[in-house]
């Protein structure tokens, strides 16, 4: 018998023995083994036999085969090359790879490749869809709660956790207006809130009661009146004569004309967030990165602060 | 040709290198060239902003603050659009940083203002409770180094062709021009004009007086730089 065949038979017996011992120890061959285990053992046996057969065949072929065929013209220091046909299976795989390469180059890679930005866009789209579904119809409590948490992140660095403006470093949102803010606006005007006609400075503010430009004394009086919540009589006539034309008799503003100076409301908050502001205290940048729902929530929260 | 190559091992090795490098070249070089182009809206720094950038580097701000927003929802929610490589086109060197003890500053100019920076630099804990950032009070006294900033402007203009005195397209379709002064005195005068705009929004009387007297404290320069980060 050929030495190779003998070696193959020894290997087969050794591997089958090893498999039997290994599976047997796992309890697969005994009566308690189920059919999946038996099938696995059968598969292992077939694999071992087929592998041995194939290996034996090729080892014998290497031992016995001699090269032959038509020699190519090229010759490198006595080393030549036969012009044999391509093996059929190899040729099929080669052609298949050529076709696959064209597909991969034109479609496979460009269309299906991983992209970090693509993953980010999917993440954002999924989050936005979930957010909108979850917060489509928020009640007032939820709006305020959401506004509060946005406030801590986006607004508190300047307005403070208590929304008190941190000792005058930013506007105190617990009151609608402070005296110096009112004076500053009257003296300098305000045109940042997106209204078609910006508020003029003091050179454009007439007091219809006196039919003259507003005076220093009147500014002091009306600033106290507005900052004090529009109570009492001092400054009330100046307000009625000068401010009420745009801001309304009750100071609650008019749509498309002037904002409310009696209280915060969601529209005012949205306008400030959209345009930013610059006034007596300093400048506030616009916050256009907030979503519509977030602006609404902040509006509800800030409105609630001064109530 | 192939027979010739096979007889010359050195050139054969070169040919193999070129063949293998080819895929890399066509994959990497065009992308790299495209990505390093300035993003529309990216401007070179003015003299004062550049002086502020030097203050930023001198005080090692990048030790605690990054300037690189990664494309994650949690980051873009807080800091704005993720960073693009073309936005660093005029940063020499870039100040990405590798550690965030403090927040990212890539777009801090969008959501902080001059007066906030002034309060914060003087006493960080006063505006951000619990902040461990130290106060940088010496910036209110030390003078910014406009000469070095101007020297850098000239250098990057000559060596890297940084587009000063050139119309640059902005994101909203307009054109912007960042001027480069002809002499150092002109550069100082232009920086002072910028500094006055910033000092007008500040509260510190010493800084206001210094700017009115023609000096530029470091705080003004660094605020100009931080405001330019958008």
Image: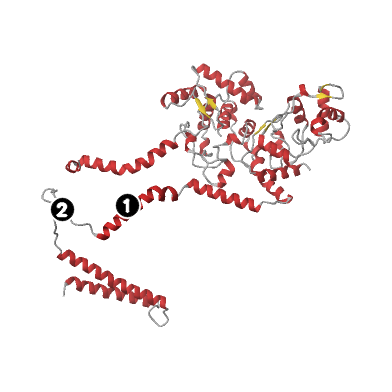
- Marks 1,2: beta carbons within 8 A: no
Q: Point out which mark residue A98 bears.
A: 1
Closer to the eye: label 1 or 2 = 1
**Dot 2 crowding, Cα within 10 Å, few <14, some 14–19, many 20+:** some
Residue A167, image quadrant? top right
Residue B30, image quadrant? top left
**Side (left or right) of A199 relative to B84:** right
Residue A18, image quadrant? bottom left
The relative height of residue A71 versus residue B64 in the rendered view (above or below) is below
Q: Point out which mark residue A81 bears.
A: 2
The relative height of residue A96 versus residue A247 in the rendered view (above or below) is below
| Mark 1 or 2, nearer chain start | 2
**Dot 1 crowding, Cα within 10 Å, few <14, some 14–19, many 20+:** few
Q: Secondary structure at mark 2?
A: loop
Q: Secondary structure at mark 1?
A: helix
Q: Residue furthest right?
A: A233
Pick the residue in front: A124 or B154: A124
Asked if badges 1 and 2 are on one and the same chain, I answer: yes
**Side (left or right) of B84 relative to A193:** left
């Amino acid at each position: 018998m050929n030495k190779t065949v003998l070696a193959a038979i020894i290997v087969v017996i050794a591997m089958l023995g090893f498999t039997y011992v290994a599976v047997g120890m796992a309890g697969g061959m005994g009566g308690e083994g189920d059919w999946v285990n038996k099938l696995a053992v059968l598969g292992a046996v077939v694999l071992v036999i087929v592998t041995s057969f194939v290996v034996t065949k090729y080892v014998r072929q290497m031992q016995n085969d001699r090269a032959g065929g038509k020699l190519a013209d090229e010759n490198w220091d006595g080393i030549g090359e036969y012009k044999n046909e391509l093996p059929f299976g190899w040729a099929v795989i080669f052609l298949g790879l050529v076709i696959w390469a064209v597909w991969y180059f034109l479609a496979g890679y460009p269309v299906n490749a991983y992209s970090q930005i693509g993953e980010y866009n999917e993440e954002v789209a999924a989050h936005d869809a979930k957010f909108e579904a979850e917060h489509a119809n928020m009640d007032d409590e939820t709006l305020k709660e959401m506004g509060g948490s946005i406030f801590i992140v986006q607004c508190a660095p300047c307005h403070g956790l208590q929304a008190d403006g941190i000792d005058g470093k930013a506007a105190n949102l617990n009151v609608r207006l402070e005296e110096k803010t009112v004076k500053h606006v009257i003296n300098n005007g305000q045109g940042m809130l997106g209204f078609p006609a910006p508020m003029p400075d003091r050179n454009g503010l007439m007091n219809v009661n006196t039919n003259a430009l507003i005076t220093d004394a009147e500014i002091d009086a009306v600033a106290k009146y507005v900052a004090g919540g529009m109570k009492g009589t001092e400054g009330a006539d100046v307000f009625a004569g000068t401010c009420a034309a745009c801001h309304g008799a009750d100071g609650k503003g008019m749509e498309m004309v002037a904002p409310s100076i009696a209280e915060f409301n969601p529209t005012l908050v949205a306008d400030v967030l959209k345009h930013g502001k610059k006034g007596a205290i300093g400048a506030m940048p616009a916050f256009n990165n907030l979503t519509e729902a977030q602006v609404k929530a902040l509006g509800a929260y800030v409105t609630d602060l001064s109530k | 040709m192939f027979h010739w190559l096979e007889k010359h091992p050195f050139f054969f090795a070169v040919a193999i290198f070129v063949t293998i490098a080819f895929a890399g070249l066509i994959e990497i070089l065009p992308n790299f060239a495209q990505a390093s182009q300035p993003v529309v809206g990216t401007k070179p720094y003015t003299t004062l902003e550049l002086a502020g950038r030097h203050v930023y580097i001198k005080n090692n701000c990048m030790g605690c603050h990054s300037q690189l927003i990664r494309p994650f929802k949690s980051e873009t929610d807080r800091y704005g659009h993720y960073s693009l490589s073309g936005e660093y086109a005029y940063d020499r060197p870039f100040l990405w940083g590798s550690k965030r003890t403090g927040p990212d500053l890539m777009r801090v100019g969008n959501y902080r203002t001059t007066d906030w920076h002034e309060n914060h630099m003087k006493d960080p804990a006063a505006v951000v409770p619990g902040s461990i950032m130290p106060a940088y009070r010496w910036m209110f006294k030390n003078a910014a180094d406009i000469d070095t900033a101007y020297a850098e402007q000239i250098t990057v203009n000559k060596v890297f062709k940084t587009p000063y005195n050139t119309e640059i397209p902005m994101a909203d379709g307009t054109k912007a021009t960042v001027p480069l002064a002809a002499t150092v005195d002109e550069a100082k005068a232009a920086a002072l004009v910028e500094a006055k705009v910033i000092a007008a929004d500040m509260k510190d009387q010493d800084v206001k007086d210094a700017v009115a007297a023609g000096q530029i404290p470091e705080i003004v320069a660094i605020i100009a730089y931080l405001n330019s980060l958008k």
